[in-house]
Image (cartoon, rainbow, N blue to C red):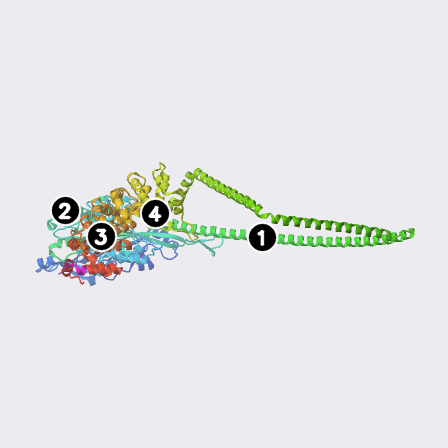
């Protein structure tokens, strides 16, 4: 009996023959091979090499490409195995011939041919390679692509496309595998991949990545007719893991419901859009010279950008209401799904029959897919069917849909444009390099000019020095010649004088004069002078003898006169001493006068200079002496000005003076030697007054820090409690928002928590609640002080319980501190973790706290501390505590915790 077969939607009798070359049994060539070896009969040139006409041909005509359709059979499920046990499958596959038979009855069937026929045993990898991989390759080459799944509800569309395969990687669907190939082929430095994930529900486009965006409009380009969704969320993908997380987020927001055909039936069409932007380098045409056709001028390479889009569509399943059992709102959903699928079928029928009108605007689904059917995208369709004879009608409708889709022809086009931004960026980089090179050359030129100028100046200086030296030598030479001339003239003058004297002597003798007479007169005169000298000497000797005799007489009558002289000496010394004393008093009075005159200005200047030396609770370096023996500024100020004057400035009306004064007091309070004097002088009361009445955040912060420093002394702790300090600190903790203020307040309360005598009063005045309230800040320094306070409080409670002074459960547990302790006991900050681990160990030592700690999860933390704590003392303490508590031991046995 001759069989009946549908061939491209036409019912024919007789033996089955291949429909067309595209539907033959031979596997069609890959898309890349078609690009590299285009068919001569294709009617259009592809972009290949440096063909001058490639751009225009590809941009205008495009590459013809038929919609490829594959069919996939779902295996029988558990329900069908029971219900259809006595019936054969209504579908018979012949994958080697790429055909299937749809049984009408036991003796008659219809035969259909597809591009691929996938059995129920086909793996997800084979489905991807056959259906989607050619489309993905074309998208990487610059073409748009679409992969769509169509079929009855429950036949495996979502499994084929959207399976994540986290448990079993072999189950990964087309979406995950497509992104793997795209990321493996592109370069993240020059290329980009962006993703949008949408659903079409009740004719409304909703964003699966942002559920608030639930009414996205479709925008069409009036020139090109391209469809875009400007309101959709677009996420750039850098790695596969982020893409899987994005799919998981979208699937969580997708609408699904339980029907008779599928327990998780998709009630919307899911549309995943992957936008790929790739940078390539293209060369313009060779420009022929008008004068000589042999020579060619080739333009430089220009950067190009290829923008392509891969659309993966998981259609909602077509269904019949009486089979799915949809009611109420689900019935409306089913109607909307069937209407959109019906509109899609009408468009495909019109395209298959080359109708003049294609009803694209009948549905938003057809508007979104207008480029996939009859457009410029490379499209693959996978239709999924089931084997059950109960759904033969739906299976026939699905097969008929695929047969008609095979007749649709698309014209594939590359969307390529010049990357002006990249070119501009490269030109800017080249311009910057040229500017930098020009600056370097200008700098080198300036340096060379400067070097030449320096060299010229050095040569001029050298010439000037040589000229000066030569001039000096010439001057010395002239002077020497002048001296020689003078010396010669003097010698000549002496010689002439001698000649003249000798001539005069001779003439005198000739006149009868005797020179010996004048000589005798001169000798007599000399003798006379000698006698006078002898006389004067004799008179001097007589005077000396006379003085000696008088001195002897004076020495004989000396004792009585010595007494008077000594008295005079003593009176003179007393007057000198008195004068010196008066001078010293004058100096002192002058210095006091100057001090009183400039005291106010000195105080303001000192406070302004040293007020900022305040550094916190535990900084004492500013109070130590410097290396050369000089005291630090604060100590010097303390000695020069005086504590009372500094405390008096705390009540100044000038805010700046008050701020600087409280900073100085806080720094002084950090030194243990000054704390007692500050408290005795009323400094604690003044600080509490500032904390109570002053609204300036800086004053409150520094005052709290000063109180924290004073709270380190046990005697001061009781005074702070008696004067209402804990209440003021609690109010400040509730009002303050500055982390540094909260750190100071937390430090003060933490110091008070370490006093055994103040436990009850501290808790009654809200100290613990204030400490726990400050964790809202989240600052590590604040949390560290809070943890220290809790550890101090727990340690005091443990000591009181050990001494028998406390019997009830911990006040920390009653005030709700345990959950926060457990939550932060393994904090990354070492200070927080160490204090809270110690607090847990101390709380666990009191047996009455054991049940609360077990119910609050503290047991697991104690076990962790006993094993992994970095501090040996805390780890040993936790181990001893767990071993000594019967309640903890019983709970660990119940939970089978090795100890």
Image quadrant in which the C terminus is located: bottom left
Residue 542 belongs to magenta span? no
Indicate the quadrant where residue 126 lies: bottom left
Predominant SS along the magenta part? helix
Q: Is residue 898 left or right of residue 584?
A: left
Q: Which mark, by number, is residue 674?
A: 4
> For the residue labelled by badge 4, is the local secondary structure a helix, a strand or a loop?
helix
Q: Give the mark nearer the N terminus: 3 vs 2.
A: 2
Q: Is residue 868 left or right of residue 671?
A: left
Q: Nearer the viewer, mark 2 or mark 1?
A: 1
Nearer-the-camera pick, 748 or 393: 748
Q: Nearer the viewer, mark 3 or mark 2?
A: 3
Q: CA distance from mark 4 to mark 1?
A: 65 Å
Magenta region, residue range? 882-886
Q: Give the mark nearer the N terminus: 2 vs 1.
A: 2
Residue identified by numbered label 2: 330
Q: CA distance from mark 1 to mark 3?
A: 81 Å
Residue identified by numbered label 3: 796
Query: Around disc 3, counting alpha carbons within 10 Å, would you say few (fewer than 14), some (14 to 19), or many (20 or more)?
Result: many
> Which x, y percent locates residue 189?
35, 55
| Camera sees residue 745 | yes
Residue identified by numbered label 1: 454
Q: Is residue 505 left or right of residue 645?
A: right
């Amino acid at each position: 009996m001759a069989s009946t077969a549908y061939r491209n939607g036409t019912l024919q009798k007789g033996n089955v023959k291949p429909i067309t070359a595209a539907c033959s049994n031979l596997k069609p060539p890959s898309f890349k091979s078609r690009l590299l070896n285009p068919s001569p009969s294709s009617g259009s040139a592809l972009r290949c090499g440096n063909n001058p006409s490639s751009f225009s041909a590809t941009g205008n005509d495009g590459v013809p490409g038929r919609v490829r359709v594959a069919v996939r059979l779902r295996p029988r499920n558990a329900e069908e195995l029971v219900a259809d046990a006595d019936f054969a499958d209504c579908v018979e596959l012949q994958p080697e011939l790429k055909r299937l038979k749809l049984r009408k009855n036991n003796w008659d069937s219809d035969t259909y041919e597809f591009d691929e026929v996938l059995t129920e045993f086909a793996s997800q990898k084979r489905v991807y390679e056959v259906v989607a991989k050619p489309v993905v390759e074309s998208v990487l080459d610059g073409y748009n692509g679409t992969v769509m799944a169509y079929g009855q509800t429950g036949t495996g569309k979502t499994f084929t496309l959207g399976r994540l395969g986290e448990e079993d990687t072999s189950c990964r669907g087309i979406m995950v595998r497509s992104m793997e190939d795209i990321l493996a082929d592109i370069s993240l430095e020059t290329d980009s991949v962006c993703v949008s994930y949408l659903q079409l529900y009740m004719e409304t486009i909703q964003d699966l990545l942002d559920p608030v965006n639930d009414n996205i409009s479709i925008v069409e380009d009036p020139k090109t007719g391209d469809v875009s969704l400007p309101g959709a969320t677009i996420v750039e993908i850098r790695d596969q893991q982020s893409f899987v997380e994005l799919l998981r987020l979208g699937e969580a927001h997708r609408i699904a419901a339980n029907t008779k055909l599928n327990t998780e039936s998709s009630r919307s069409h899911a549309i995943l859009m992957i936008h790929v932007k790739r940078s390539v380098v293209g060369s313009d045409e060779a420009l022929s010279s008008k004068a000589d056709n042999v020579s060619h001028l080739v333009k430089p390479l220009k950067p190009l950008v290829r923008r392509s889009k891969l659309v993966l569509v998981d259609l909602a399943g077509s269904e019949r209401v009486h089979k799915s059992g949809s009611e109420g709102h689900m019935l409306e959903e089913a109607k909307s799904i069937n209407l959109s699928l019906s509109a899609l079928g009408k468009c495909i029928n019109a395209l298959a029959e080359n109708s003049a009108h294609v009803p694209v605007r009948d549905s938003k689904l057809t508007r979104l897919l207008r480029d996939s059917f009859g457009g410029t995208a490379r499209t693959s369709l996978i239709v999924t069917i089931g084997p059950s004879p109960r759904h033969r009608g739906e299976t026939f409708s699905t097969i008929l849909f695929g047969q008609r889709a095979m007749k649709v022809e698309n014209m594939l086009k590359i969307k390529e444009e010049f990357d002006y931004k990249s070119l501009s960026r490269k030109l800017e980089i080249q311009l910057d390099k040229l500017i930098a090179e020009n600056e370097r050359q200008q700098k080198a030129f300036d340096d060379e000019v400067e070097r030449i100028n320096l060299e010229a100046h050095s040569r001029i200086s050298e010439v000037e020095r040589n000229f000066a030296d030569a001039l000096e030598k010439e001057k010395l030479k002239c002077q020497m010649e002048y001296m020689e001339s003078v010396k010669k003239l003097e010698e000549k003058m002496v010689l002439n004088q001698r000649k003249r004297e000798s001539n005069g002597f001779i003439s005198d003798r000739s006149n009868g004069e005797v020179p010996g007479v004048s000589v005798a007169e001169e000798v007599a005169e000399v003798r006379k002078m000698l006698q006078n000298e002898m006389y004067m000497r004799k008179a001097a000797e007589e005077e000396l003898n006379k003085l000696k005799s008088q001195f002897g007489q004076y020495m004989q009558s000396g004792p009585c006169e010595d007494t008077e002289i000594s008295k005079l000496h003593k009176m003179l010394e007393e007057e000198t001493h008195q004068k010196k004393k008066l001078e010293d008093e004058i100096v002192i009075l002058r210095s006091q006068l100057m001090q009183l005159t400039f005291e106010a200005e000195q105080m303001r200047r000192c406070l302004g200079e040293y007020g900022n030396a305040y550094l916190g609770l535990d900084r004492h370096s500013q109070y130590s002496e410097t290396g050369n023996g000089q005291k630090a500024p604060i100590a010097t100020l303390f000695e020069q000005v005086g504590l009372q004057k500094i405390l008096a400035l705390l009540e100044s009306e000038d805010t700046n003076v008050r701020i600087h004064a409280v900073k100085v007091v806080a720094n002084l309070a950090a030194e243990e030697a000054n704390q007692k004097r500050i408290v005795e002088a009323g400094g604690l009361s003044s600080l509490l007054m500032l904390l109570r009445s002053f609204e300036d955040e800086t004053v409150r912060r520094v005052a709290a820090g000063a109180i924290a420093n004073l709270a380190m002394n046990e005697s001061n702790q009781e005074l702070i409690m008696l004067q209402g300090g804990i209440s003021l600190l609690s109010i400040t903790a509730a009002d303050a928002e500055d982390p540094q203020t909260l750190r100071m307040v937390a430090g003060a309360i933490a110091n008070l928590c370490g006093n055994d005598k103040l436990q009850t009063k501290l808790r009654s005045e809200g100290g613990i609640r204030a400490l726990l309230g400050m964790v809202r800040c989240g600052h590590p320094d604040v949390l560290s002080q809070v943890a220290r306070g809790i550890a101090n409080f727990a340690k005091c409670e443990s000591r009181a319980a050990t001494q028998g002074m406390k019997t009830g459960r911990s006040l920390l547990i009653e005030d709700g501190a345990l959950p926060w302790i457990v939550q932060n006991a393994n904090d990354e900050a070492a200070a927080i973790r160490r204090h809270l681990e110690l607090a847990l160990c101390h709380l666990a030592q009191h047996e009455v706290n054991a049940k609360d700690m077990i119910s609050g999860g503290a047991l697991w933390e104690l076990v962790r501390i006993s094993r992994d704590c970095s501090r040996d003392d805390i780890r040993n303490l936790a181990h001893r505590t767990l071993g000594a508590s019967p309640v903890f031991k019983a709970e660990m046995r119940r939970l089978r915790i090795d100890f």
